[in-house]
Each structure stands twice: as structure tokens, then as C-alpha cells.
Amino acid sequence: MTRPQEELLPATRRALLHRIATAQAEGRAPSLVATVVRGRDAVWTGSRTSVEGHGPDENVQYRIGSITKTFTAVLVLRLRDEGVLDLGDPLEKHLPGTGAGEATIAELLAHTGGLAAESPAPWWERTPGSLRPELADVLGDQPFRHPVGRRHHYSNPGYTLLGALVEELRGAPWEQVLRREVLEPLGLDRTSGQPKAPHAGGWAVHPWADVMLPEPVEDLGRMAPAGQLWSTAKDLARFAVFLGRGDDRVLSAESVREMRTPAAPAEAADVAAGSAYGLGLQIQHRDGRILVGHSGSLPGFLANLTISVEDDLAAVVLSNCTSGPLVASVGADLVRVVAEAEPRIPDAWRPLREIDADVLELAGQWYWGTQVFALRLTADEGLSLGPLSGTGRRSRFRTNGDGTWTGLEGYYAGELLRPVRRADGSLSHLDLGSFVFTRQPYDQGAPVPGGVDPEGWRGIQ
């Protein structure tokens, strides 16, 4: 997977090193390791440490906290793709008796199930999971804080329920299922529920003095699907490639794209911050680009995975302190540094191998009322529709194989595009979710709703 680091220009490598060095020094982190992925390959790894001569490399394990949730989400999407469940199913259908069964599986994935953020006291991250042996111990007497489906409210117990769902439907422990269905196919042999040498120790750094305190390492028990995993920069780099491209051995490109799509109603503060949440993935608009991934923290550890699909770049940042470096900002900056210094070189344009004449006839300009749109054939044999100039509704469409097309995004997502032909076979207009698109503005020869004044266009009388 890893190619020589000389693939990046020397100035780029120095800028990356400067960013993590600044993060480690200003964040007062015992150690920090980072990796940048371009395409399918890790092209740079760097680290900083407070212990001279003992810098971590890409094979040292750190605890990754809530990045674990993304792995759990992958397992749930696999069950959906196999037809075992539907994301709209209430949890009660597959895992009865929890007391939180009215929330749907999709709502739990997107943290819109209305559940509490944490389990009842004592603080679950610093106490043994044996204190919460049953789901009832994780949820408590009053599991809900909000109406189901109304708002995004991050919930660790929600992902505990999803892990229990996986166990129920697979008939095996969550970690065993994860290893068999995700870790082994993707070659993530240094990702595990328990630490394996070499691994970093977790530390708390005093906020007002340059001294440290070791943090306890607890087995989270039932809460494991929300934050148990340990991993390495190398393994998470591979996982980032999967989340950007898919892998049919685990999840298709279409399913990981669904994970990267906003699925939760955004709070006003989220809109202002440019952040959203998909199905097990955080989404952020930053520096003019869409970043997806997840951050994680447990006492003694901070972790971040950031992906820019458009730039074909990803970054992993791992540190062993309870608080300090802003790892999400570091990850975003590592992606930005490479994207700006060495922009992605586009794939070569190539014409389609073949084209249906009826499809080719759809290409060109169309009018919705007086607004002009362009309909184009794309290299993946789909269609794209958008305003010829300025802003407006845009969407890509996939063929249904019967002459109709379904919208994939934006206002027209899920809407049907239907070319309508006259009795002689000539193309009359496009029907898009009841909107009529014509070759000329308010074409008198097309069935424009409300009709067209028979006297036609005119100037001032």
C-alpha cells in the first residue's frame, strides 16, 4: 500500500511535518502520528514525540474511540444490503424488549433516535464495562432525551444498540463479526478490541503544568461498538480508501456513498459551522471542500480520520493524550496542504464507447418556463441536468433501463425523468416530477401546464 514518500514534493512533506510538529508542541501531546493517503496509497507518514528516539510509526496502535462507530455502521449496512433488515425498520422488529425500540435503525445510525448522549453514571469511559452487563444498564430507566427523529443528538448508547443488533442477527459477538466481515477482508490486521504491542500508553497532561498522569484502560463491555477499538495509522489509511471507494467484499461504492450522505437534521449551529452527520460518518464543509470521516476520543487518546473524496485524499491523526491537539483540525489541514500544493490531476477525458441514438437526442438545452437548462450525457452513461448559467437545481440521473431516469441528488433525488414522444416518435418534452421541460421557452407545441397564450411572445403594447 505504501509507496516511497518522495511521491510528494519536498516542500509539501515539510509543510505536513510542520503542521503535526506544531500540533504536538502546542497541544502538549506525549506523541502524535499522522498519515496522508492519496488515491489508494499512503504517501506520507510523520510523527512527533516527547521521548527522544522513540517516535511512533504507522504500525503503533492507539485507541481510536468513536471511529469505532463507523466500523459498526459498516456492519449494519452490510445487513441492509443482504436484505436482512431495512434501515426504516424500528429496532423493536429485530431486537425486541430494549425499551428504545421505536427508534429506526437509520435514526440510530444518524444519532437522531432521541437517546441520551451517555449511559447512566458512573462515567462509562473510565469504569469497567462489567458495571453495565445488560442493555438496560446502558440505557437506564429513561433512555430518551428528545422525540424520536426530530433532532441530531449524539448518542453512545445508540451505537451500543446497533452493536447488539449485529450480534442478534449474526449470532456471534460484535468483535468476532467485525473481524470476519470487515477487518480481515480489508487487511486491517492491526485493528483490535484489545491493545497489541507495539501500542501507545494513554496519558492525561496537566492543564497548568508540564506533567502527566497515566489514564486507565478499560474494557467497555456492552459499550464496545461505540468506542472500543485500537488501530494504527496504516490500518486507518486502508479504511479511508475503503470509505472513499467501496470494496465489494465489504460494502459497495454506492453503500459507502450513502454513508457519506447527510442523514440527520442539522441544528442551527451545525448549519453555521458547516457540519452534518451521515450514517456513521461526520461531514464537514471546510476550506471550500466537503470532508467526511470521524473523530474519536477516550481517556488518554485522540483520533481523527478525514477524507476528501473530491481531492482523492485522506488523513489519519492519532495522539495519546486526553485533550490537547485539535486532531480534527489537524486532519483537515493535512488534506488541505496536499490538495493546494499538489492538486489532483484529472483523469484523461475519453469518449463513450457507444451511445443509444434516443439517449443522445436528449442532450442539449431545455427550458423550464423561461429558465434555460443543459442536459448532458456523462462518462458513466448517466445524465446530468443543471442551469446553463448561474445557480439553480442540479442533479445527476441514472437510467432505469426502460427509457426513464431517476434523480440521484439535490431537489430531484428520487424523482423520475421521463422523455415524452409524440405519436410519430419525435421528442416532445421532458417530464421531471410533473415539471415540463421544452426545447423552446413555453413551446406552443408542447403540453405546457396552464397552456400558452396563442398570440405568443410580444413587446410592450
Image (tube, rainbow, N blue to C red):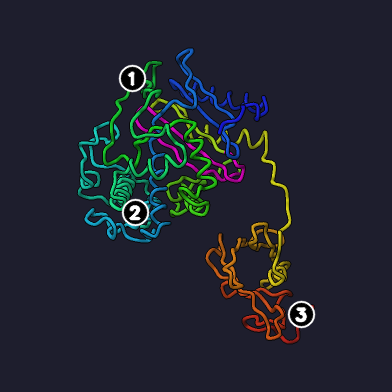
Q: Tell whether label 3 touches label 2 (CB within 8 Å).
A: no
Mark 1 residue crowding within 10 angstroms, few (<14) / some (14–19) / many (20+) = few
Label placed on residue 213: 1
Q: Residue furthest top?
A: 52
Q: Earlier in the sequence, mark 3 or mark 1?
A: 1
Mark toward the start of the polypeptide (1 vs 2): 2
Residue drawn at point x = 29 percent, y = 46 percent: 172
Amino acid type, mark 3: Trp
Give the labeled residue for mark 3.
Answer: 457
Report the predominant secondary structure element of the magenta stretch: strand
User: Dot 2: few (<14), some (14–19), or many (≥20) neighbours within 10 Å?
Assistant: many
Per the image, the residue denoted by label 2 is 113
Identify the mark nearer the N-term, 2 or 3: 2
Out of 353 and 12, give the one closest to the viewer.
Answer: 353
Going 45% across and 48% down the picture, which residue do you hit?
250
Q: Position of residue 150 (x, y in %)?
A: 37, 57
Residue 210, image x, y percentages: 41, 16
Of marks 2 and 3, the one in the foreground: 2
Camera-side residue of 159 and 210: 159
- In the image, what residue occupies the spot 44% across and 22% down? 29
What amino acid is found at the position of numbered circle 1 in the picture? Answer: Leu
Check disc 1 and report its element: helix, strand or loop.
strand
